[in-house]
Amino acid sequence: MKQEINKIDMVFDDIIGQQSAISILQSAIYKSHIAPAYLFSGPDGVGRRLTALRFLEGVLNNGQVDLRNRRRLERCNHPDLLWVEPTYKHQGRLITKSNADKEGIVKKGPPQVRLEQIRAVTQFLAKQPSECKRGMVVIEYVDAMPESVANALLKTLEEPGHGLIILISTSPERLLQTISSRCQKIMFGRLGSKLLKEVLLRVDKTNKISSLISNSEQPELMALSGGSPGGLIKNIGIWEALPKDLMMRLDALPQASLEALSLARDLTEALQSEQQLWLIDWLEYHLWFSTQDDRPIRRLETLRKHLLSYVQPRLAWEMAFLELRDFV
């Protein structure tokens, strides 16, 4: 028995933290008690997607590692796997966010899981699997769907056949209660700083591990990431893309009026709107750590509202910097 459990441990070996979630899934594989539907919930970037992949690998191979199936699952080209992501509608076709970014498509509103995709799930599960005992479906950001689409998903969950469905959600409270009640719930939590660093040490795609570890010491980036390794890596990437001279000037906000106006001008010329909104988040933590005063945060929230309301960005930053002088 211990040998079998160790094999299952190996399947989940690259999942850091999330021991409670892993234990439940290990037990399900070992006892062959696989539920028809699971709800993986928790913040972005804490391992829900990777855990889903490893769980499916374990289900396919009785808890043992199978590198061939692992590659096929990771590439979403296993014949018995359907992976669903929220999409945009563009020129009569559905396109995922990552593909929209690659193609430079201007997007209005957030992507959604759409009725056509849920119908495809139903058709997929109605077919006989090619290699496995069950068809496998993963739906990411399942809370990003209109009510009509959620009702269609509910019908599929009511009659999943021999399918295995994994729903991945950041906001499970937004799901229909009837959907949640038909899933076994697997909770994923935020990670502490030690585990965050351990995740970073395993990320070697950019060959900037030393830089990642160094920058992760910054309290603002750690706080912004909220215990999410994926969030931390994303925030470090944003930080590294910002002009270094500009960030040095923001470290201690200017007191002289001309310097404040100059900083607002340079900032809005150098940064895109999304970077400016991210910078507001960074400044809120930066000023809180240095002043422990919530007044600068309230003023920065006003700045955020102005930018989102399409107030001229340079004017909005000028007003904010001039007023922040009274608090720092």
Image (tube, helix red, strand yellow):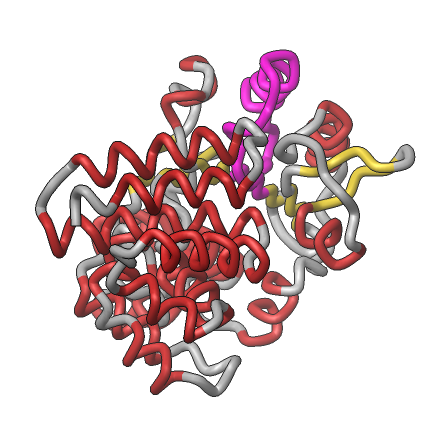
| Location of residue 147 in the rendering, given as x and y in whole percent from the top left corner | 59, 13
Q: Is residue 77 left or right of residue 26?
A: right
| Location of residue 58 in the rendering, given as x and y in whole percent from the top left corner | 45, 60
> In the picture shown, does residue 50 fall above or below 156?
below
Question: Is residue 23 visible in this depiction of the protein?
Answer: no
| Highlighted range, magenta | 138-166
Quarter of the rendering occupied by the N terminus: bottom left
At a point 45% along the width and 61% down the height, the residue shown is: 234
Q: Nearer the viewer, residue 290 or 134?
A: 290
At a point 48% along the width and 50% down the height, the residue shown is: 276
Q: Is residue 84 left or right of residue 90?
A: left
Q: Residue 208, located in which quarter of the rendered image?
A: bottom left
Q: Is residue 154 magenta?
A: yes
Extreme left residue here? 292
> In the picture shown, does residue 136 fall above or below 147?
below
> In the picture shown, does residue 275 fall above or below 70?
above
| Location of residue 60 in the rendering, given as x and y in whole percent from the top left corner | 53, 58
At a point 44% along the width and 29% down the height, the residue shown is: 305
| Location of residue 312 in the rendering, given as x and y in whole percent from the top left corner | 57, 37
